[in-house]
Image (tube, coloured by chain):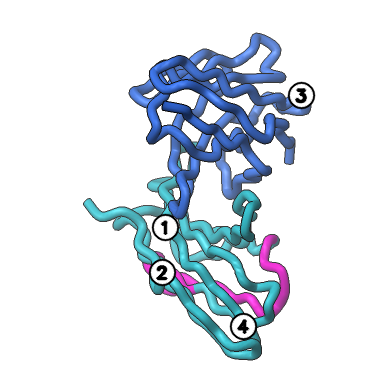
Amino acid sequence: GAGVSQSPRYKVAKRGQDVALRCDPISGHVSLFWYQQALGQGPEFLTYFQNEAQLDKSGLPSDRFFAERPEGSVSTLKIQRTQQEDSAVYLCASSPNRVNTEAFFGQGTRLTVV
Amino acid sequence: DAKTTQPNSMESNEEEPVHLPCNHSTISGTDYIHWYRQLPSQGPEYVIHGLTSNVNNRMASLAIAEDRKSSTLILHRATLRDAAVYYCILAKYNFNKFYFGSGTKLNVKP
Protein backbone atom coordinates (compact mmCIF):
# COMPACT_ATOMS: atom_id res chain seq x y z
CA GLY A 1 0.00 0.00 0.00
CA ALA A 2 0.93 3.66 -0.20
CA GLY A 3 3.21 5.18 2.36
CA VAL A 4 2.96 8.57 4.02
CA SER A 5 2.34 11.21 1.39
CA GLN A 6 3.18 14.88 1.80
CA SER A 7 2.30 17.77 -0.46
CA PRO A 8 3.59 19.91 -1.88
CA ARG A 9 7.11 18.49 -2.09
CA TYR A 10 8.54 21.98 -2.52
CA LYS A 11 7.12 25.35 -1.54
CA VAL A 12 8.60 28.79 -2.01
CA ALA A 13 6.89 31.49 0.02
CA LYS A 14 7.49 35.19 0.26
CA ARG A 15 8.19 36.45 3.75
CA GLY A 16 4.90 37.25 5.45
CA GLN A 17 2.89 34.78 3.37
CA ASP A 18 0.80 32.03 4.97
CA VAL A 19 1.44 28.42 3.94
CA ALA A 20 -0.35 25.11 4.47
CA LEU A 21 1.44 21.77 4.30
CA ARG A 22 -0.53 18.56 3.92
CA CYS A 23 0.13 15.09 5.24
CA ASP A 24 -1.74 11.94 4.20
CA PRO A 25 -0.77 9.23 6.70
CA ILE A 26 -0.99 5.52 6.07
CA SER A 27 -4.64 4.52 6.25
CA GLY A 28 -5.73 3.46 9.72
CA HIS A 29 -2.67 4.82 11.52
CA VAL A 30 -3.61 6.25 14.90
CA SER A 31 -0.55 8.37 15.62
CA LEU A 32 0.69 11.26 13.51
CA PHE A 33 3.77 13.41 14.06
CA TRP A 34 5.21 16.55 12.53
CA TYR A 35 8.94 17.31 12.57
CA GLN A 36 11.03 20.23 11.31
CA GLN A 37 14.48 19.58 9.85
CA ALA A 38 16.86 22.45 9.22
CA LEU A 39 19.68 21.99 6.74
CA GLY A 40 22.38 19.71 8.13
CA GLN A 41 20.48 18.99 11.36
CA GLY A 42 18.44 16.09 12.67
CA PRO A 43 14.64 16.35 12.65
CA GLU A 44 13.09 18.22 15.59
CA PHE A 45 9.70 17.34 17.02
CA LEU A 46 6.87 19.80 16.48
CA THR A 47 3.60 18.12 17.43
CA TYR A 48 1.80 14.80 17.92
CA PHE A 49 -1.76 13.63 17.28
CA GLN A 50 -3.53 10.55 18.47
CA ASN A 51 -6.48 10.26 16.10
CA GLU A 52 -7.94 13.78 16.01
CA ALA A 53 -6.61 14.81 19.41
CA GLN A 54 -3.48 16.93 19.51
CA LEU A 55 -1.79 15.50 22.60
CA ASP A 56 1.54 17.32 22.42
CA LYS A 57 2.36 20.59 20.71
CA SER A 58 5.34 21.46 22.84
CA GLY A 59 7.68 21.64 19.85
CA LEU A 60 5.80 24.26 17.87
CA PRO A 61 8.24 27.20 17.79
CA SER A 62 5.69 30.00 17.95
CA ASP A 63 2.01 30.78 17.78
CA ARG A 64 2.44 31.27 14.04
CA PHE A 65 2.53 27.47 13.74
CA PHE A 66 -0.75 25.57 13.88
CA ALA A 67 -1.54 21.93 13.15
CA GLU A 68 -4.81 20.10 12.84
CA ARG A 69 -6.14 16.64 12.10
CA PRO A 70 -9.92 17.16 12.26
CA GLU A 71 -11.09 13.69 11.21
CA GLY A 72 -8.20 11.68 12.53
CA SER A 73 -6.62 11.05 9.14
CA VAL A 74 -5.22 13.86 6.95
CA SER A 75 -3.28 16.53 8.82
CA THR A 76 -2.36 20.09 7.88
CA LEU A 77 0.50 22.14 9.28
CA LYS A 78 -0.13 25.85 8.82
CA ILE A 79 2.48 28.55 9.20
CA GLN A 80 1.27 32.12 9.31
CA ARG A 81 3.35 35.18 8.35
CA THR A 82 6.32 33.04 7.31
CA GLN A 83 9.81 34.21 8.20
CA GLN A 84 13.18 33.23 6.79
CA GLU A 85 14.00 31.08 9.81
CA ASP A 86 11.00 28.91 8.94
CA SER A 87 12.89 27.61 5.91
CA ALA A 88 13.33 23.89 6.50
CA VAL A 89 12.06 20.47 5.51
CA TYR A 90 8.82 19.60 7.28
CA LEU A 91 8.42 15.86 7.85
CA CYS A 92 5.25 13.99 8.70
CA ALA A 93 5.22 10.50 10.20
CA SER A 94 2.49 8.07 11.17
CA SER A 95 2.37 4.98 13.34
CA PRO A 96 -0.26 2.27 13.55
CA ASN A 97 -0.96 2.53 17.27
CA ARG A 98 -0.17 4.33 20.47
CA VAL A 99 2.61 2.12 21.68
CA ASN A 100 6.27 1.76 20.89
CA THR A 101 6.62 0.66 17.32
CA GLU A 102 8.05 1.91 14.09
CA ALA A 103 7.05 5.23 12.62
CA PHE A 104 6.72 5.71 8.86
CA PHE A 105 7.97 9.01 7.50
CA GLY A 106 6.98 10.88 4.38
CA GLN A 107 9.55 12.46 2.08
CA GLY A 108 8.86 15.88 3.51
CA THR A 109 7.98 19.31 2.21
CA ARG A 110 10.92 21.63 1.61
CA LEU A 111 9.83 25.17 2.50
CA THR A 112 11.95 28.09 1.35
CA VAL A 113 11.00 31.55 2.56
CA VAL A 114 12.43 34.37 0.46
CA ASP B 1 14.24 13.07 27.76
CA ALA B 2 17.40 10.97 27.90
CA LYS B 3 19.86 11.83 25.15
CA THR B 4 22.25 9.79 23.03
CA THR B 5 25.82 10.40 21.85
CA GLN B 6 27.05 9.20 18.46
CA PRO B 7 30.19 9.85 16.39
CA ASN B 8 29.63 12.49 13.74
CA SER B 9 30.83 10.30 10.90
CA MET B 10 32.15 6.86 10.05
CA GLU B 11 33.51 5.22 6.97
CA SER B 12 33.22 1.64 5.77
CA ASN B 13 34.18 -0.46 2.79
CA GLU B 14 31.51 -2.08 0.69
CA GLU B 15 30.59 -5.65 1.67
CA GLU B 16 32.30 -5.33 5.06
CA PRO B 17 30.47 -5.23 8.41
CA VAL B 18 29.83 -1.88 10.04
CA HIS B 19 29.43 -1.26 13.77
CA LEU B 20 27.73 2.03 14.63
CA PRO B 21 28.06 2.89 18.34
CA CYS B 22 25.68 4.86 20.53
CA ASN B 23 26.08 5.95 24.15
CA HIS B 24 23.02 6.57 26.30
CA SER B 25 24.32 6.66 29.85
CA THR B 26 21.17 8.33 31.26
CA ILE B 27 18.78 5.74 29.83
CA SER B 28 15.87 4.83 32.09
CA GLY B 29 14.28 1.42 32.55
CA THR B 30 11.31 2.31 30.35
CA ASP B 31 13.34 3.67 27.41
CA TYR B 32 13.41 1.68 24.21
CA ILE B 33 16.40 2.07 21.88
CA HIS B 34 15.43 2.90 18.30
CA TRP B 35 17.57 3.27 15.21
CA TYR B 36 16.47 5.18 12.13
CA ARG B 37 18.42 6.12 9.04
CA GLN B 38 17.96 8.93 6.58
CA LEU B 39 19.12 8.69 3.00
CA PRO B 40 19.75 11.93 1.10
CA SER B 41 16.53 13.80 0.27
CA GLN B 42 14.40 11.16 2.01
CA GLY B 43 12.48 11.00 5.26
CA PRO B 44 13.92 8.88 8.08
CA GLU B 45 13.45 5.13 7.73
CA TYR B 46 13.01 2.67 10.60
CA VAL B 47 15.88 0.23 11.03
CA ILE B 48 15.43 -1.61 14.31
CA HIS B 49 14.52 -1.19 17.97
CA GLY B 50 14.91 -3.07 21.23
CA LEU B 51 14.67 -2.87 25.01
CA THR B 52 17.14 -5.23 26.68
CA SER B 53 17.88 -8.22 24.48
CA ASN B 54 19.82 -8.16 21.24
CA VAL B 55 17.57 -7.95 18.18
CA ASN B 56 17.95 -9.08 14.60
CA ASN B 57 15.95 -8.27 11.50
CA ARG B 58 16.51 -8.36 7.78
CA MET B 59 18.21 -4.97 7.78
CA ALA B 60 20.50 -5.10 10.78
CA SER B 61 21.27 -6.33 14.27
CA LEU B 62 21.10 -4.36 17.50
CA ALA B 63 23.48 -5.26 20.28
CA ILE B 64 22.56 -3.77 23.67
CA ALA B 65 25.07 -3.62 26.51
CA GLU B 66 24.13 -5.46 29.68
CA ASP B 67 23.85 -2.18 31.64
CA ARG B 68 21.95 -0.63 28.68
CA LYS B 69 24.17 2.44 28.74
CA SER B 70 25.31 1.80 25.19
CA SER B 71 24.25 -0.04 22.07
CA THR B 72 25.65 -0.89 18.65
CA LEU B 73 23.89 -1.10 15.32
CA ILE B 74 25.47 -3.74 13.13
CA LEU B 75 25.14 -3.79 9.36
CA HIS B 76 26.48 -7.19 8.39
CA ARG B 77 27.52 -6.35 4.83
CA ALA B 78 27.51 -2.68 3.94
CA THR B 79 26.36 -1.70 0.47
CA LEU B 80 26.56 1.66 -1.26
CA ARG B 81 22.84 2.07 -0.58
CA ASP B 82 23.53 1.99 3.16
CA ALA B 83 25.26 5.37 2.96
CA ALA B 84 23.03 7.53 5.15
CA VAL B 85 22.78 9.37 8.45
CA TYR B 86 22.00 6.90 11.24
CA TYR B 87 20.14 8.11 14.31
CA CYS B 88 20.08 6.38 17.69
CA ILE B 89 16.99 7.44 19.64
CA LEU B 90 15.50 6.67 23.04
CA ALA B 91 11.72 6.52 23.33
CA LYS B 92 9.20 5.55 25.98
CA TYR B 93 6.83 2.59 25.51
CA ASN B 94 3.94 4.93 24.80
CA PHE B 95 6.20 7.18 22.80
CA ASN B 96 4.90 10.37 21.35
CA LYS B 97 8.09 11.95 20.12
CA PHE B 98 11.64 11.16 19.08
CA TYR B 99 14.72 13.24 19.88
CA PHE B 100 16.92 12.65 16.84
CA GLY B 101 20.17 14.41 17.68
CA SER B 102 22.77 14.83 14.93
CA GLY B 103 23.31 11.16 14.09
CA THR B 104 26.28 9.43 12.43
CA LYS B 105 26.91 10.01 8.77
CA LEU B 106 28.02 6.71 7.27
CA ASN B 107 30.08 6.78 4.11
CA VAL B 108 30.49 3.49 2.24
CA LYS B 109 33.43 3.19 -0.12
CA PRO B 110 33.29 0.89 -3.16
Chain of the residue displaying label 4: A
Q: Is residue B23 left or right of residue A3?
A: right
Mark 3 Cα shell of 10 Å, populated few (<14), some (14-19), many (≥20)? some
Please tell me if label 3 and label 1 are on a single chain: no
- Checking the image for residue B25, the label placed there is 3
Label 4 to label 1: alpha-carbon separation: 22 Å
Label 4 to label 3: alpha-carbon separation: 42 Å
Q: Earlier in the sequence, mark 4 or mark 1?
A: 1
Secondary structure of residue under mark 3: loop
Asked whether disc 1 touches disc 2, contact meaning CB atoms under 8 Å apart, the reply is yes
Nearer to me, B62 or A58: B62
Give coordinates of residue B80: x percent, y percent: 39, 32
Task: Give yes or no for residue A72 being in the magenta stretch.
Answer: yes
Q: Which residue is mark 4?
A: A114
Label 2 to label 3: alpha-carbon separation: 38 Å
Mark 1 Cα shell of 10 Å, populated few (<14), some (14-19), many (≥20)? many
Asked whether disc 3 touches disc 1, contact meaning CB atoms under 8 Å apart, the reply is no
**Which residue is the extreme one toward the right?**
B26
Chain of the residue displaying label 1: A
Please tell me if label 1 and label 2 are on a single chain: yes
Amino acid found under the numbered disc labelled 3: Ser
Mark 2 or mark 3, whichever is nearer to me:
2
Mark 2 Cα shell of 10 Å, populated few (<14), some (14-19), many (≥20)? some
In the rendered image, what is the letter of the chain coloured cyan? A
Label 4 to label 2: alpha-carbon separation: 17 Å
Magenta span: chief secondary structure: loop
Q: Which residue is mark 2?
A: A9
In the rendered image, what is the letter of the chain coloured blue? B
Asked whether disc 4 touches disc 2, contact meaning CB atoms under 8 Å apart, the reply is no
